[in-house]
Image (cartoon, rainbow, N blue to C red):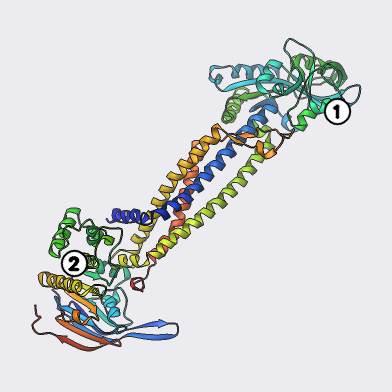
Amino acid sequence: MGFLLLMKIGWRNLWRNPRGTLLTALALGLGLTLLLISLGLLDGSHEQMVNNAVRFGTGHVVVQPMGYQDSASAELLLPPRVVSTTEAFLHTEAMKHVLRGMSPRLLASGLLSSAANSSGVNLMGVIPKQERAVSLIPQRIVEGNYLNDDQQSGVVIGTELARKLDVKVGDKVVFMTQAVQPTGTDEADAGGGEMQSTLLRVSGIFRTGIQAIDAHIIQLPLPEAQALLGVPGRVTQVAILLEREGDSLMVAQDLQKQVTGIPVEILPWRQSMPTLAQSFLLDDAFNYVMNGVVLAMVGLGILNTILMRVIERHHEFGLCLALGLRPAQLAVMIIGESLALTALSLALGLVLGLSAQHYFATAGLDLRWFFESSLPTTLVFDPVIYSRLSLARIASSVGIVFLTATVISFYPAYKAARTELPDALKVF
Amino acid sequence: MTEWAVELKDVKKAYHTGPIEVPALRGISLRIAPGEFLALAGPSGSGKTTLLNIIGGLDRADTGEVLVEEKNLQLLSSGELARLRLLRLGFVFQTYNLLPVLTALENAEFTLLLQGVPVEQRKDRVQTLFSEIGLAGLEDRRPGEMSGGQQQRVAVARAMVTKPALILADEPTANLDSVTATALLQVMEELNRAHGTTFVYATHDPQVMERARRLIHLHDGQITSDVTRAGHAL
C-alpha cells in the first residue's frame, strides 16, 4: 500500500537535480572504486610476495620432523617412509593439477672457508632437478651454472658470501661441519658428532636480493651432502610448491592424514613462515583502516548531500504529512531514495572499479618509477604489482559500501520523519 | 450525518518566542454545519491559519475543545490525527501545494493511494473530477508545466477525491490573478453544491470573501463578526 508510490517519489526526486545526483553517485562510486583498486593491489602484491617467499623458503607446504620448526636441529631427520609416502601422495591423479613441484632437502649448518676468509653457512643438500621446480635460487644464478643432476659435486653460493670469501666461479672452498647423529641412534654406531670436511668447487653464484640467503645459504647435491653428514638416504624436509596458494591448507591436511601416527609436522606456509603471514595481517589491518577513513570521508560527504536534499524539501514533507502520510512512511521514502542513489553509485563504482582492476591485473602497477634510476639490489618483490580480486572480495566491498550508504541514510530519514506540523507548512 | 461538521468551544492557542507569549486564538467558539461554504477573513496575524490548522488537526489548541465530526481532536494521538486527515479531511494550501515530481494525476490520486484504493477506482475518480473542474487533458503534466490556477485546481481535486467531510483551504487564491481566483472559487462552489462537502477557507481578499455564504471576521485571535448571507443558501 503506497510503497510503490513512495519508491516512485524517491526515484523521481533523485532526478530533480540530475547533476547533483550524478556527482553524489560518482563520489560514492569512487569510494567503491578506490576500495576495489586498493584491495586488488593489496591481494595481488600479497600473492606475488607469497609466490616469491615460498620459493625462497619452504614452499607452500613443508613436511619436516616434529619439532623442527622450533629447534631447526640438524639431528631431526624425516623417516624415509614419510618421504616415500609424501612422494606417492603427491603423484596421485588427484594431485596432478595441484602440485607444481616438490624438493627433498637435507639441512645443516657449518663453516665455509676460502683462502681469504671463513663464514658460517646453512647447507642445503638438494636434488637439482627437483629444486629447480620449487626454488627460485636456480633462476637467480648470476655467474656460472646451477647444480646439475649429472654432476655429483660443486656448490652454489650467494653473491654476499662470494664477496666475503673473495671467491668466484671455479674457485675451491672447504666446507666443515659436524656429522649428524639422527635422533634415536647411538653415536658410536652412527659416527655422529665427528667433524667432517670436504673440498668443493664453486659452480655458480646466485643473487636473490635477500641478505640472509645471499650471505648464508649454500646448495650442493643431495648425495654429497648426505655422505658428508653421514646420513645416506635421509633428508630433513620436503618442500612442496603448489599451483595455487589457496590449496596450501587442504594439501597439508590431506597429507597429514597419510602419515597419521608418525612424528612429523606438515605446515602450510602461514605456519612455516609465520613472520610473513603476520606481516600480511598487519598490512591488511592498515589497509582496512585506510579504506575505513576513505569510506568515512565519502560517507560524510554523502550524508551532507542527502541531508541538504531533505532540508530543502522540508515544506514538501510537511505537505505529505498534512495529507495523511505517516512519519514512518516518510522515512521509508527517504531510505528508498538513498538506496536508489546507492544502487546507482554501486553500478558506477563497479564499472569504474572493475575497469581499473582489469587494467592493473593485465598491465600491472609499475613501481619502477619510484626507484628512479635503478632497482635496489635488495628488492625481493616484483616491482610491477598485478591486481588480484576474488569474487568474495568484490562482494564484500559492495556489501560494505551498501551498508555504509544505508546506515548513512538513517539520519536524514529520521530527520524527515521528525518534520513538525504545522511549522513545515509555513511559506516564507 | 452529524449535527455539526466542526464545533469549537473556547479554543485558545498561543505561540512562544523565547520568553514572550504571543496569543494567536483567544477563546474561539464556533459551530460549522455540514455543507457550509465558509470564509475566515481578517488581516495577517488575526489567527485565520492557526484556526484552520487546529480544525485540520495540524496543530493542537492549548485549551478548549475541537470537535470534527464529533471527534475531539484534543484526545487523538498524532497517528489518529494523521488517519483522520487522510480519510475525512482535505487540504488546499496557499502555494507549493503539489509534489513537483508527480504528474497532475498522480498528485490528485496521492491520498487515494495512501488509502489503498485500487488503481481502476483511483483513475476513475480522478478522471471524473478532472472533467468536472476543467483539468481533462492535463493528467500527465507536472506542476512546473501548469499555471498557478491549474495547480490550485489539481490541489482542490486532490482534496476532493477522497470524498472528505471537510475541506480546509488556506488562502487558496493568494497567488492567483483575480480572473483565475474567481474561476477557482467557482470550482469550489460547484463542488460544494454538487457534493455537499463543507468548505472552510481563509482569505483576506474582499473579492473572495464575497463568494462565501458565511463570513467570519477574525481580529487578534477573536471572532469579531459572523455573518450568514441571504441568497447564498444551498
Q: Secondary structure at mark 1?
A: helix
Q: Amino acid at mark 2?
A: Met
Within 10 Å of disc 2 (Cα), the crowding (few <14, some 14-19, many 20+) is many
Q: Which residue is mark 2?
A: B160
Split into 4 quadrants, where in the image is the C terminus of chain A? bottom left
Report which quarter residue A226 is drawn in.
Answer: top right
Q: Report if residue A418 is visible in the image.
A: yes
**Front-lying residue, A195 or B16:** B16
Residue B156, placed above or below residue B70: above
Residue that appears at 79% across and 20% down: A185
Q: Tell me which chain the residue with mark 1 is part of.
A: A
Task: Pinpoint residue B17: horizontal percent, then vertical percent.
Answer: 42, 82
Residue for point 62% across, 32% down: A48
Identified by mark 1, the residue type is Lys
Image coordinates for residue B11, horizontal then vertical, percent? 28, 84
* Residue for badge 1: A164
Viewer-closest of A137 and B77:
A137
* Same subunit, tags 1 and 2: no
For this orientation, the residue located farthest to the bottom is B224
Residue A295 locus on image (x, y percent): 53, 51
Give the side of residue A379 with respect to residue B58, left or right. right
The percent coordinates of residue B70 (x first, y second) are: 20, 76
Q: How many marks?
A: 2
